[in-house]
Image (spheres, rainbow, N blue to C red):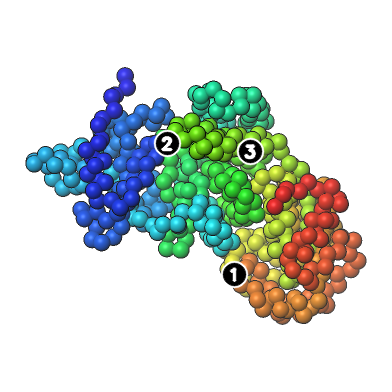
Amino acid sequence: MPHPPQDQSATIAMLAQGAEARIDTNAAILFLGQFSALSQGEDRVVKLKRAVDLGFLDFTTLAARKSVCEAEVALNRRTAPDLYLGVEAVVRGADGRLALGGEGDPVDYVVVMRRFPSGDLLAEVAARGGLTAPMLRDLADGVAAFHAEAAVAQGSGATRMAAIIAGNRRSFAALPQGALDASKVALWARRAEGALALVAPLLDARAAAGKVRHCHGDLHLANICLWQGRPVAFDCLEFSEELATTDVLYDLAFLLMDLWERGHREKANLVFNRYCDRVGGQTGEEDGLPALPLFLSVRAAIRAHVGAAGAMRQADSATRATKLGEARAYLDAALGFLEGGARGLVAVGGLSCTGKSTLAGALAARIGSAPGARWLRSDVLRKLMAGVAPEERLPPASYTREASAAVYAEMERRARDLPDWPVVADAVFADAAERAGIAACGAPFLGLWLEAPEAVLVARVDARRDDASDADAAVVARQRDYAIGPIDWQRIDASGSPQQTLDAALAALAQHGFILQKP
């Protein structure tokens, strides 16, 4: 039998006295300010769980709120140990007054956090155009490291995803009539269940391999902040271990979907590829990619029904219409993610500093469907095979003929293992056998050969910073004497700006029938 909700009005009034700002959500109230009982001049966030029963969570009892506060702190310390300070009791003293901490009978519990600066949510950083490549690499590295340490779960991966889809169907059905197009909702459910049937054996195999773990569960840009200059995930899904226990790629998919739908498609592709490079060492996450369209679709579907439910609670008709429009766009996106994309292999070759990686990264976000092509970069593969981070320099012994042959062989192996996913292969490809080897790994295939005068290459290598390539001016000079042989790939003049090179490459891809995304 459900418990009647407890009256929290006195607790809310007491906490509001020490706050300079308040944020309300469906399940919690956050108070921001300097609370004398908690700190000496430092800003804090005090989070009170609402005494509500929303179906998927029930915080109506004091014991439940205490338990979920303790779980929130413990789970979020996995990714944000500096932010989560602990759980504090709201007590009633002998004089009958409420206080935060101290002696008395507990009447409620709150989570206490350090406060990060206003504007440092990644959703806000993204809105002002502040997402940078180093920031996104740090974010992907952090997610990969977190997933590697997260607790492994047993059971069927397909069964878990079926339960998530069924939960979404129930949430759609609970919406007021007219909130979303019922025919689109029904179409999404049919297509999602069909996609699940196709990848069910894969999901079970990934679960058996330890790829289903107790993850973050709510990994989108509004639950990531900048803390001491680095992106940190916080506010994980704490109230249900079952809902937060998922395939690691499904956890990542929320972040990728959020970036993609906000219009940051090249950044979504960067995070996707960096994660794949870092999470699995030499094996990556290529085996799970056939399930990624379904994962992205389900994440968008969640945004659709949650957004629609929130919109229908709005009293202002204009606000309600705006939020319904956003929810309906997410439903369209959920359908779009299930449409799939074109396969194919594009190789980008040329001497060092011709701009191969700049071009390859831009192309990877434009080829196929979300989140774009798998970008296989020889400079990164070489570092992964050596067991170091992509930006760490390697000694000359890692660049012998034998070592380089192993890198090209690994690139070819990975490209062959992705027959149904678009691939961009990025390497010098100075040897005719290397060009022939990669060309045999995928169809349709297009090779792009970048060319620029040596003076341009030297100027670029001198300006290079924080990159996976170890090439310097001496390498550029040595490459003048390479016996490259006849080039039967599409030649691209790379002496101009990156945008000019990209425009020429996109024109070549379109001419060869590659399906391209809008920027």
Mark 3 vs mark 2: give the one in front.
3
Q: Earlier in the sequence, mark 3 or mark 1?
A: 3
User: In the rendered structure, which amino acid carries the disc numbered 1?
Assistant: Asp
Whole-percent x and y of residue 360? Answer: 72, 59
Query: Residue 134 occupies which quadrant of the picture?
Result: bottom right
Which residue is more in the foreground, 329 or 397?
329
User: In the rendered structure, which amino acid carries the disc numbered 2?
Assistant: Glu
Whole-percent x and y of residue 336? Answer: 67, 37
Q: Earlier in the sequence, mark 3 or mark 2?
A: 2
Q: CA distance from mark 3 to mark 2?
A: 28 Å
Secondary element at image label 2: helix
Mark 3: few, some, or many residues within 10 Å (few <14, many ≥20)? Answer: many
User: In the rendered structure, which amino acid carries the disc numbered 3?
Assistant: Ala
**Mark number displayed over residue 333:** 3
Mark 2: few, some, or many residues within 10 Å (few <14, many ≥20)? Answer: some
Secondary element at image label 1: loop
- Residue at x 24% of width, y 57% of height: 39
**Mark number displayed over residue 466:** 1
Q: Residue furthest left?
A: 95
Whole-percent x and y of residue 476? Answer: 75, 77
Which residue is more in the foreground, 264 or 312?
312
Secondary element at image label 3: helix
Q: CA distance from mark 3 to mark 1?
A: 35 Å
Q: CA distance from mark 1 to mark 2?
A: 39 Å
Whole-percent x and y of residue 65? Answer: 30, 36
Q: Circles 1 and 2: CB distance less than 8 Å?
A: no
Q: Earlier in the sequence, mark 1 or mark 2?
A: 2
- Residue at x 61% of width, y 52% of height: 264
- Residue at numbered disc 2: 241
Mark 1: few, some, or many residues within 10 Å (few <14, many ≥20)? Answer: few
Q: Circles 3 and 2: CB distance less than 8 Å?
A: no
- For the N terminus, which image quadrant? top left
